[in-house]
Image (cartoon, rainbow, N blue to C red):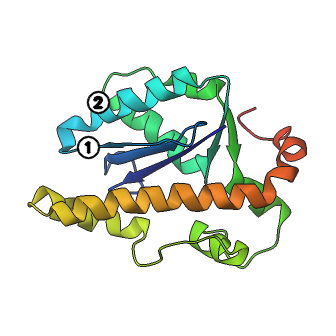
């Protein structure tokens, strides 16, 4: 089982780019791929697809795959990359599991993490990534680190939430849209 998250400069793939792709691999290692400039986005996508290929038989845990997968595929197509392997992956969308089976005021990762007692840095959100990336491109190394730390924080929170709901995954996952 691996955990996957992306950070982008927009919610729309035709308006923004993929800035960071992050993983927590089965061995516990965290891998982060960062677009040092917009021209490096293609390389980040290639590395992401390589991780998927290497782990194609593992479950890939994502928070709200209805965003991450279409964004990734859209940007891959933009760069002439074949990302069709994502449709063969065993994706577990824990946001969807929670939305369909639990009753919360909000299904945002930050809110659900708080409910389950998972540690979460609430000072930086996905909405801050565009601003921080512009700051990074203007020379702020601190902005780069904040984006990366936000991705790592999301991955860690996702993993902690998954631990709380994993007993429900096998039965629920039979109905998952990607499986």
Residue 83 point in image, percent of width and height: 47, 25
Callouts 2 and 1 close, C-beta under 8 Å: yes
In the image, residue 27 above or below residue 101: above
User: Quarter of the image containing the N terminus?
Assistant: top right
Image point 74% across, 56% down: which residue? 163
Front residue (pair 6, 73): 6
- Secondary structure at badge 1 equals loop
Q: In the picture provided, is 112 more to the left or to the right than 50?
A: right
Q: In the picture provided, is 172 more to the left or to the right than 83?
A: right
Answer few, some or many: residues within 10 Å of disc 2's Cα (few below 14, many 20 plus, some between 14 and 19): some
- Secondary structure at badge 2 equals helix
Residue 136 in view (yes/no) = yes
In the image, residue 169 above or below residue 41: below
Q: Earlier in the sequence, mark 2 or mark 1?
A: 1
Residue 77 in view (yes/no) = no
Image point 58% across, 37% down: which residue? 27
The part of the image, by quadrant, that contains residue 48 is top left
Front residue (pair 25, 15): 25
Image point 24% across, 58% down: which residue? 144
Q: Which residue is mark 1?
A: 35
Q: Which residue is mark 2?
A: 43
As measured in the structure, the alpha-carbon distance from the residue carrying label 2 to the one carrying label 1 is 8 Å
In the image, residue 105 above or below residue 177: below
Q: In the picture provided, is 44 more to the left or to the right than 11?
A: left
Residue 25 point in image, percent of width and height: 55, 38
Front residue (pair 127, 161): 161
Q: In the picture provided, is 65 more to the left or to the right than 115?
A: left
């Amino acid at each position: 089982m691996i955990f996957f998250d992306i950070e982008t400069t927009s919610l729309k793939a035709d308006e923004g780019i993929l800035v960071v792709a992050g993983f927590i691999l089965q061995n516990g290692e965290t891998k982060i791929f960062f677009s040092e400039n917009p021209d490096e986005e293609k390389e980040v996508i290639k590395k992401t697809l390589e991780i998927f290929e290497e782990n194609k038989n593992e479950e890939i845990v994502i928070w709200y795959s209805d965003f991450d997968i279409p964004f990734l595929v859209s940007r891959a197509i933009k760069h002439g990359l074949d990302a069709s392997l994502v449709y063969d992956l065993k994706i577990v969308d824990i946001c969807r599991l929670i939305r369909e089976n639990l009753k919360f005021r909000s299904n945002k990762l930050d809110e659900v993490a708080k409910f389950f007692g998972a540690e979460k840095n609430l000072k930086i959100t996905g909405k801050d990534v565009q601003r921080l990336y512009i700051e990074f491109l203007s020379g702020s190394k601190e902005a780069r680190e904040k984006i990366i730390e936000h991705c790592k924080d999301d991955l860690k929170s996702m993993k902690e939430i998954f631990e709380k709901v994993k007993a429900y995954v096998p039965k629920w996952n039979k109905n998952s849209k990607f499986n």
